[in-house]
């Protein structure tokens, strides 16, 4: 949108998408809502150095709820545990944007990512190879985030050459040390970590 920064554009889309979901699903919202956030999902939601939960998703959800005179009670945990809590009614909704995958559409009522998210191949900055599909990664050491649909699909296609990490920043640091050939992850997440940790990496296809 002309005249807006990239962050402002993302925030505008966030308000429209989340506001639509809230107004349609919670016309009579309580004055307090328990909202789940993934605790290690930089830059969207994370807890750093003992500080309070922070991140882009946290700011957006808190602002939208505040405009509705609703107090947000954040709950930070892993996505797997948040899904279980949501099923039991222990939280009202998950505040993170999620990939628009068949699995997520089955599990959740409203899955519409508000930012331009796509999976990208991350390479060492000295690597001139191109990876356009999983077929191109056959026989290569691929790093992915554990317990995700991406990890499951990659392992089904590539087998034991896939290495899972509990945190994506650990996968990126392994790639920077040339212990991997490529990492597969969302573009906005890897761009954040490359800049934050000054890693000698680049975003490929």
Image: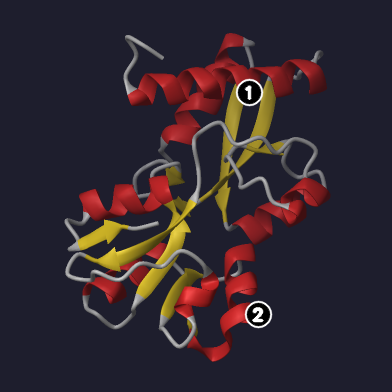
Nearer to me, 16 or 180: 180
Mark 1 Cα-neighbour bin, 10 Å: few <14, some 14–19, many ≥20: some
Identified at 46% across, 59% down, the residue is 185
Residue 147's tag is none
**Residue assigned mark 2:** 156
Nearer to me, 78 or 117: 117
Give coordinates of residue 71: x percent, y percent.
60, 21
Identified at 80% across, 38% down, the residue is 109
Nearer to me, 116 or 37: 116
Give coordinates of residue 7: x percent, y percent.
36, 25
Mark 2 Cα-neighbour bin, 10 Å: few <14, some 14–19, many ≥20: few
- Asked whether residue 94 is in view, the answer is yes
Q: Quadrant of the C terminus?
A: bottom left
Q: For the residues carrying marks 1 and 2, which lies nearer the camera in this image? A: 2
Lower position in the chain sequence, tag 1 or tag 2: 1
Q: What is the tally of numbered marks visible in this picture?
A: 2
Identified at 36% across, 54% down, the residue is 190
Are the two marked residues, 1 and 2, in contact with CB atoms closer than 8 angstroms?
no
Q: Quadrant of the N terminus?
A: top left
Element type where label 2 sits in the image:
helix
* Vertical placement of residue 175 versus 54, above or below: below
Element type where label 1 sits in the image:
helix
Give coordinates of residue 130: x percent, y percent.
35, 67
Q: Left of 83 or right of it: where is 62? A: left
Q: CA distance from mark 1 to mark 2?
A: 33 Å
- Asked whether residue 42 is in view, the answer is no
Display colour scheme: secondary structure
Nearer to me, 170 or 26: 170
Identified at 50% across, 43% down, the residue is 117
**Residue assigned mark 1:** 17
Give coordinates of residue 187: x percent, y percent.
41, 49
């Amino acid at each position: 949108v002309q005249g807006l920064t990239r962050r402002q554009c993302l925030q505008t889309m966030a308000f429209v998408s989340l506001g639509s979901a809230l107004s349609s699903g919670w016309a009579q919202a309580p004055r307090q809502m328990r909202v789940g956030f993934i605790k290690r999902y930089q830059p969207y939601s994370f807890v750093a150095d003992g500080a309070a939960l922070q991140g882009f998703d946290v700011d957006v959800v808190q602002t939208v709820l505040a405009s509705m005179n609703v107090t947000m009670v954040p709950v930070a945990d892993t996505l797997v545990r948040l899904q279980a809590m949501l099923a039991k009614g222990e939280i009202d909704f998950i505040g993170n944007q999620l990939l628009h995958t068949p699995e997520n559409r089955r599990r959740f009522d409203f899955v519409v990512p508000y930012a331009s998210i796509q999976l990208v191949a991350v390479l060492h900055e000295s690597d001139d190879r191109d990876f356009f599909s999983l077929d191109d990664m056959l026989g290569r050491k691929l790093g992915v985030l554990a317990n995700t649909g991406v990890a499951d699909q990659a392992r089904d296609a590539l087998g034991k050459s896939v290495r899972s990490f509990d945190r994506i920043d650990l996968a990126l640091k392994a790639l920077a040390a040339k212990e991997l050939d490529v990492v597969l992850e969302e573009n906005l997440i890897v761009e954040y970590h490359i800049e934050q940790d000054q890693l000698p990496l680049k975003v490929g296809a």
